Structure formats: structure tokens, C-alpha cells
Amino acid sequence: MTALLQGSELPEAQKRAVAEKLHGYTGLPVNYILKADLRVNGGEFSKQLRADEGITVGRLDTRYSGPDIDPLSQETSYDPQSDSITSAWNTAINSYLHTDMKYATQDTYLLSARQGGEFSWNLTHHPPGRGGGPVTPGSVENGPNVMPDLAYRMKLNPKMKVFLTGGYYDLATPYFEGIYEMHHLPMPNALQANISYKYYEAGHMIYVREDILKQFHDDMANFIRGTQKPN
């Protein structure tokens, strides 16, 4: 972070030292990191990590990989994880809803809102504590940050408990990002004790492997029991 803040004033020797350290963290070639000016996004990482093998690395779970679609693209063109398991879980959820739950038997559970026709996200957001008056510059966020909302609710209800989970191999919501966000919540430090953390040997969908699913189930059940008052 210190190196990025220096911009053009960053000495070349220090820039290379940072690139070499990033190479150790990520596996990306030093020259590629330097060409990217030390700034590499997730899509570029997935594209470049195994580019010399013609392989693209998964976004939702980096343990998945597949053939590179476009060798000349800057970023990956697809997510091998999604293409590997989407049809399986989509079939499973539709079977569960229709056969087991007897719910909406004539309807189809869609993978995404985009599959229902023309669709666009409305990302306008009014953070709490800023009044309910007319929309003014700065009062609406595009690509909303809802961490202030969580902090606001935790301050209104100091007994509220939060359970944060994730997978080590997730590039969509990367490991440590959630921890970082939680420790920067705009609220009294005493409320940090209300937040529990649990990460798994998994990707974005931590329930894909049955053993991790069972572990997650037990952890969630224990969390819920821990929030209940004793009789």
C-alpha cells in the first residue's frame, strides 16, 4: 500500500522489490506485475497465473481450472468453477423444490435474475444515518457499501451477533477481505466481540464438498445456540 501511494515517486529498486514480494504471494511473473504497475485485478490473476500452460484459473474457487478461451485477452473469459458445477446444483435445487418441498412445481428456479429477461441492477443506496430527504450528491452510493448499515444495526442492537464465513480459495470475496472490512466497521470496538469468524478449505460455495458442508452445518448450529439465552 505504501508503494502504491507513492505513485511515480516510487524508486525503481523498491518497485522491483515489491513486485518480487508479490510474485512470492501470488505466483505471477515479476515482469507481468511490473508491466501492470503493481496493480493486478482478479480477472487478470485468473488469466495469467497459468497462462503459459493455456489454463484459466477459477474465480469462485481457484482449485478449478479449464482451457483458456481467448489466449489474447487481458482477463479470463469465463469461470471454470461455475461451468463445472452449475448444472449439477441447478438440477439439485429444482429437484428439491419440486419433489421434496412440493413448491412451485410448474416453475423453474433460475440461476440468475438475468435469465428472466431484460434485467439491470439498481445499485442506488441510502446509507443509514444520513436522513431521508431528497437525493443529493453524496447521499446515494452506486455499487453500495453496506458496511455502514451493518455497523448501524449493531449499534442499535448491541446484543446482535454476526457470523462471517468464507473459503480460502475464493477470488470473488477473497479471504481476509471480509476480516478487513469487519475491523473497519464504524462502531465502538467493544462490539467487535459480537463477530465470529470461520473460514474453510473451500471456495465461494463452501458447501460443495460434503465434509465441509457438514462442518459448516455444525459451526452454524453452534453459533445459533450460542446466541440463545440460557433457560
Image (cartoon, helix red, strand yellow):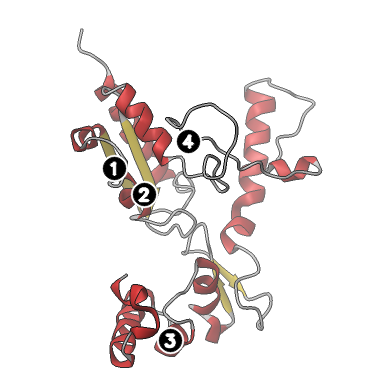
Q: SS for tag 1? A: strand
Q: Nearer the viewer, mark 4 or mark 1?
A: 4
- Spot occupied by residue 36 in the image (x, y as percentages of width and height): 48, 81
Mark positioned earlier in the residue sequence (4 or 1): 4
Q: Are marks 4 and 1 in contact (CB under 8 Å)?
A: no
Q: Nearer the viewer, mark 2 or mark 3?
A: 3
The residue to which callout 2 is attached is: 178
Spatial CA span between label 1 and label 3: 35 Å
- Spot occupied by residue 209 in the image (x, y as percentages of width and height): 45, 48
**Which of 55 and 214 lies nearest the eye of the viewer?**
55
Q: Please tell me in which quadrant of the rendered image residue 150 appears.
A: top left
Left or right relative to 136: residue 145: left
Spatial CA span between label 4 and label 3: 38 Å
Query: In the rendered structure, which amino acid carries the disc numbered 4?
Result: Pro
Q: Nearer the viewer, mark 2 or mark 1?
A: 2
**Which of 220 and 153 lies nearest the eye of the viewer?**
153
Instruction: Answer above or below: position of 17 versus 26.
Output: below
Spatial CA span between label 2 and label 1: 9 Å
Instruction: Answer above or below: position of 66 versus 202.
Output: below
Identity of the residue drawn at 65% across and 78% down: 73
- Spot occupied by residue 22 in the image (x, y as percentages of width and height): 34, 78
Mark positioned earlier in the residue sequence (2 or 3): 3
Q: SS for tag 3? A: helix
Spatial CA span between label 4 and label 2: 19 Å
The residue to which callout 1 is attached is: 197
Query: In the rendered structure, which amino acid carries the disc numbered 1?
Result: Tyr
The tag on residue 127 is 4
Q: Is residue 215 in view from this perspective?
A: no
Q: Residues within 10 Å of mark 2 (few under 14, many from 20)?
A: some
Identity of the residue drawn at 35% across and 48% down: 181
